[in-house]
Each structure stands twice: as C-alpha cells, then as structure tokens.
Image: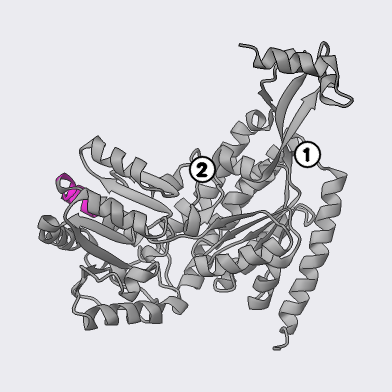
Amino acid sequence: MNAIPKSDASAIQRLDARIVTQKAAFLRNPYPSAAQRREHLGALAAMMLRYRPRIVDALDADFGSHPKAAGELIEVLGVAGRAAFVAEHLAAWMQAEPRATDPGLFGSGRACMLPQPKGVIGNMVPWNFPFEIALGPLTEMLAAGNRVILKPSEYTPVSAALLQEMITVTFDPDLVDVAVGGLELSKAFPMRRWDHLLFTGSPQVGRSVALAAAEQLVPVTLELGGKCPAILADDAVNAKNVGHILGIKLIKSGQVCISVDYCLVPRARMDAFIDLARAHAEAHLGNYSQGPSCTGVLPRSLDRLRSGLDEARDRGCQVIRLETRVDTDPACRRWPLHLVIDPPADLLLMREEIFGPILLVRPYDTLDEVITEINRGERPLAIYVFSEDPAVADRVLHETVSGGFCHNAAAVHGAIPTLGFGGIGRSGSGRHHGIEGFREFSNLKGVFVRGEGDHLDALAPPYGELAAGIVAAATAG
C-alpha cells in the first residue's frame, strides 16, 4: 500500500477536524433565520465582485489561456447573480408548505412540509469551472441553512488557492471552509459522514464517489455529464443554427458538461452543414484559437484528444480543422475547432464524452431512427433540437429522457437560475439551481399538528366500534 503524502495526510486531518467543528456549530444554530441566510448570500455576492480581477487571473494561469469575458460572465457574475436571485426568493422558499388532510379522520389537525437545513454539506468541485461550480451551488446550500466544505480540483491549483483565500477572508470556518489537497484527499473526501454530498465530474469517478458515500449512507447529488446531442431537422440546417452550435461548442473549448457533443443531421443536408460551418469559421473565427477568446485545453486532456483525432483519421473519417491557417498553440494549449464527419459508433470519440474542441457530425435518415439511437444509449445530460416545427421538438421532448432540453438553442438552460439543473441515470442524479436546489439541500420534514374533533383513537388498539364505523363509512356504496 502506498503511503499517503504528508501534505494530503495533513489536509485529511484538517478536514476531519473542520467537519467536527461545523457539526457542532450546526447544532448550536440548527435553523438560521432568513436574515442570517440573506447576510451570507450578500457576503458571497460581494466577495465575487471584490475578487473579480484575481479570479480572471487565476483562471488564465490554470488554463494557460482563459478569456476574461468568460471568466467574468460565468464564474463571477453568474455566481453573484445566482446569490442575488436566491436571496430575493428565500423567504418564500423557507415557508412551510401546507398539505391537505381528511377532516373526517384528522378533524382540525394541520399538516405541512417544512424545509429544514440538512447540516454539513461537502461539495467536490471539478476543474472546468473552479469558481462557478464551487460557489454557485453554495448559494442554495447557504440559503437552505447549511454549513459547507468545498473541495476544489487539484488540476486547477491556482484557482483552488484563491478560492481558499476568498472563503477564509469572507466566512467563518465553521460556516464555509475549503479543503485543498491532492488525490488522496479527493479519495478521502466522499468517505466522510456528510449530511449531503455534491459531486460534479465524470461518470467513472462519480461511481466511486457514490459507492464511498453509500458506505456512510450519505445522500448524494451527482452531476456527471455525458454525450449531449444536437438534432437538426431538415428545415434547421441554416447559418443561424450552425453558428449557434459552433459558438456553444467553443465556450471553454468544449470543456463544458452540457456542450454539444455530437450533431445529428439529415443525410441529404450533411454537405450543407459542413459548408455552413466552414463559412461561419471563415467569417467569424479567423485565427480564433490564437486569440484571447480561446480557452486552453487542460494538459491531462491533450493526449486523449490527439489520440481520438488520430483514430478517426486512421478509420477513414473526414476530419475538418475549421481554422485552416493555424495549428495547436503548445504554449497556451489552445486548439482549433475540428469536425469529425460520420464517425462509426465504436470510435473512441463516440464512446466517451469529448470535453474538448471536437464536434462529431453524424447523418440520419428518419426521426424515428434518431429517437431509437438516443434511447438505446445512456441518458444524456441534455438534448438539443433545432426545428421550425414545434411538433418535431415536442416529439423528441416526450419520447426521450434527459436531464435538460432546449429547442432551437443549446446549453442555455444551464444559465437560467430558475431552472433546476441535473442529469438522470449515468448523467447524474438530483438537481441544483433555483428552488430545486434549495429543496435538494434541505430536509423536507413532514409535520402534523393535532387539532380538535379528530378520530385518531380509532387507529390504535384495542379496535372497537369506532374503527369499525370508520371502515364501514369508507367502504359504503
């Protein structure tokens, strides 16, 4: 057995001590007031704006190249806006939700569902959005009245160190803390007895996390990604839609769980799709991958992406580099966007989530064929349908199962704070964002308050005339 590095051993000891501290603090204040929760959310939003320049710099350092605008829009303003939205709706979300009772049996008794804080929550954060996925769900965790420990990815060390500084300066450690460490800390983190655990990452690692959490009977929310298809109907192969799909694919160089992984295009319109993609690249991209709007590919992904393209070429696939005048920038790890045309189903790029600037384009003959293919595979995190006919989109919406869905757009649902976000099956379980996130990180406690004029005595032995009369009345006629 390999020894745990001293740095991780120390980090694990610190984690265990912090969990004990937070659980004790939770017991001292198990139901924070709405005012306390709004104060925490306000501090979080202010923190994002205060650290905005340093967040942008940290992202650039970890990715080799990271566009300032993407960092500010998604990782800074996205979190601050989510905190403001949650704070605005918090009072309504905290209210007990009345439930109906049968007055014939329960008299004037009242029932409700009361959202109660769960306690201490762990959040295992992926490398692709080191601030947004750490702090976005934190808004709903704090809104629900919990205490939280964040575990940033070891693959984005500069962002992890900054996140730890930000949280340490802004929050008491018995409310929010950050556990920084390497692989052994990542393995130890889901083995702790959390009151809830959120993990965002690959299905392979997610399975290990779920098994470790199951040993402690810890409830988990899993955001696991997958291969998200974009289906284009015959009437949707146009410059607007192709440009939108390429633009979404270029966000973070495709290193986004809800990015378009592959396109399904009518067979007769394949050449048109390719021509439109080339025209869009010529008109709008230029030497995009050499400029400041392109995010670098994480080093651990480069060999996998190169191998995938090499295999596609070796198997006879047409591989199109949309920026014909440039090549990969080894210093900043910036890649041009590639199309792989009609890849076979057993190709590596078809078997695994791509998570990079490669877009697969496959032909189809009928919508029945498309629906059958999607339903034959794992349930995706999202499905995108492009068609001017609402009936086409409606059919895919209701005949397939996915975590999210967009019509004439891709990935936009993930940016809407009112929409619950998550997967199903191999793409994940549970939801965060909005009221669904608040409920995910709450214990929805069923509450009954006895009133007057009930017949509850009929439920307890010894059973006599009262119980018999209730049964007779319920079964009469």
Q: Which mark is residue 470?
A: none
Q: Is residue 70 rendered to the left or right of residue 374?
A: right
User: What type is the residue that disc 2 sits on?
Assistant: Gly
Residue extent of the magenta highlight: 235-244
Q: Please identify the quadrant where the N terminus is shown.
A: bottom right
Give the quadrant of the C terminus. Answer: top right
Query: CB of mark 2 within 8 Å of CB of mark 1?
Result: no
Camera-side residue: 234 or 37?
A: 234
Q: Residue at x 36, y 65 (%)?
A: 292
Give the camera-side residue of 175 and 73: 175
Q: Position of residue 126 (x, y in %)?
A: 54, 64
Determine crowd level at label 2: few under 14, some 14-19, many 20+ residues with C-alpha closer than 10 A.
Answer: many
Q: Residue at x 54, y 44 (%)?
A: 433
- Whether residue 462 is in magenta: the answer is no
Q: For the stretch drawn in magenta, what is the main secondary structure?
A: helix
Residue wearing tag 1: 32
Q: From this viewpoint, is residue 162 visible?
A: no
Residue at the disc numbered 2? 420
